[in-house]
Amino acid sequence: MKKHYQDKNECRICGSHRLMKYFDFGPMPLVNRYVSGEEGAERIPLAVMFCEDCANSQLSVVVDPYFMFSNYLYHSSVSKTFKEHCAAMALDLQERLNRGSLRCLDIASNDGCLLKEFQKKGFETVGVDPAQNLCEIARQGGIRTICSLWGDAAAEEVIKEFGKVDVVTATNVFAHVDDTHAFVAAVSRVLTDEGVFVVEFPYMGNLIKYHEFDTIYHEHVSYFLARPLVQLFKMHKMDVCDLKEFPDIHGGSLRLYVVKEQNRTIARRPKRVETFLKDEADAGLHTIGPYQGLDTRANKLRTDFAGLLDDLRGKNKKVAGYGASAKGNVFVNFCGIDRRDLLFIVDDTVAKQGFCSPGTDIPIVSQKRLYEELPDYLVILAWNFSEEIMNKTREFRERGGKYIIAIPEVRIV
Ligand code: TMP
């Protein structure tokens, strides 16, 4: 079988080789790749390293992005929470730039979830995404979309077809990018001098604080703090002029507003950025210390979860899962559980139904099955959407069902 990954032993922010490994899953399947047969069985090393020079965390390998992203079953619009977050972002940008109509580019535009909200505000939009299946969905929804990975060639195409833009957004994609410098250079190229680059990602400080080890998987080649990113943008003559935290998005996300050094048209809040960097340093996150305990906490969680499953099995209780998210698939693989432990996993993404959670034999099914089999317990594997999922499954609860959430601690809700 062809090898689909390469080792990475240089920091993708500062170029340092002083990388210390602190978390190692061993070989893991690609948790967002839904295929059967030999290809589906491929396991790839999954370990995280800390850069002693700039404090960035990154995986020890890089998987070929075309292999991971050319057919992508994650549809952003499945989540109401995320749609609302996108609508709020459109309003935020409208107020922040206060310029009437804006020209906006969304990188990794998925099914057009964010750009639809921009269109509602009257912004002109263009998306770039490498997944053919998603580009088609977005286009059918009236979103102009270029099918490509982001980089210099895509920037060229946007400029040629659409012109330079006032806003570039990149939500939940930057952590997927190996060559961060090429990515930022292409953003800088496509952005007007008065424009803003908005980049949003799950924040590493939260991963450590809340033991979110299941958000570590091959797609996420980096785990960002603010500090290394401020350093990266500086190398491209760009400043982080403001930032905002979103505790409820993907386990706690951080949004940075980035502008070209010479840009004086957008309000800058340097104090807020400085305070954030200081808090990061005070929490010890610029040193290896806090990272080294992640291993122990993940192992404890696995033991607690296995104990709970044993207990429920002893009482003849039926247990299923909800949300075949990438993190859920990491969790079931890390815990080594199969369909004897979890009967099935419900996911509302139709395209995932009929497959198994990658690396396991646990089938992914629609909600219909939940009510046919009525398990006693439902493990909310997509814990970042717990509230939304509980709201959706009111009937399950009314018929006596209970929920289990495992992150940051195993508990019955
Ligand atoms: P994520 O945690 O990576 O965003 O993935 C969330 C997964 O959960 C995704 O596969 C969609 C699924 N999901 C549902 O099936 N129903 C829902 O109501 C929500 C919010 C998510």
Image (tube, rainbow, N blue to C red):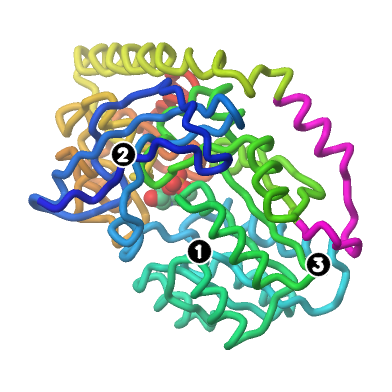
Q: CA distance from mark 3 to mark 1?
A: 21 Å
Label 3 with label 1: CB-CB less than 8 Å: no
Judge whether residue 282 is colored magenta. Answer: no
**Place of residue 178 in the rendered image (x, y in percent of width and height, measured from the top left):** 45, 50
Judge whether residue 268 is colored magenta. Answer: yes
- Camera sees residue 237: yes
Q: Which residue corresponds to mark 1? A: 108
**Place of residue 231 in the rendered image (x, y in percent of width and height, measured from the top left):** 68, 41
Which segment did they paint magenta? 259-280
Q: Secondary structure at mark 1?
A: loop
The quadrant holding residue 249 is top right
Q: Amino acid at mark 3?
A: Gln
Q: Which residue corresponds to mark 2? A: 329
* Above or below, 149 relative to 347: below
Q: Residue at x 38, y 11 (%)?
A: 300
Q: Which residue corresponds to mark 3? A: 94
Q: Residue at x 53, y 81 (%)?
A: 157
| Mark found first going from the N terminus, 3 or 2 | 3
Label 3 with label 2: CB-CB less than 8 Å: no
The quadrant holding residue 166 is bottom right
Neighbor class of circle 2 (other Cα within 10 Å; few <14, some 14-19, many 20+) is many
**Place of residue 172 in the rendered image (x, y in percent of width and height, measured from the top left):** 53, 51
Q: Secondary structure at mark 3?
A: helix
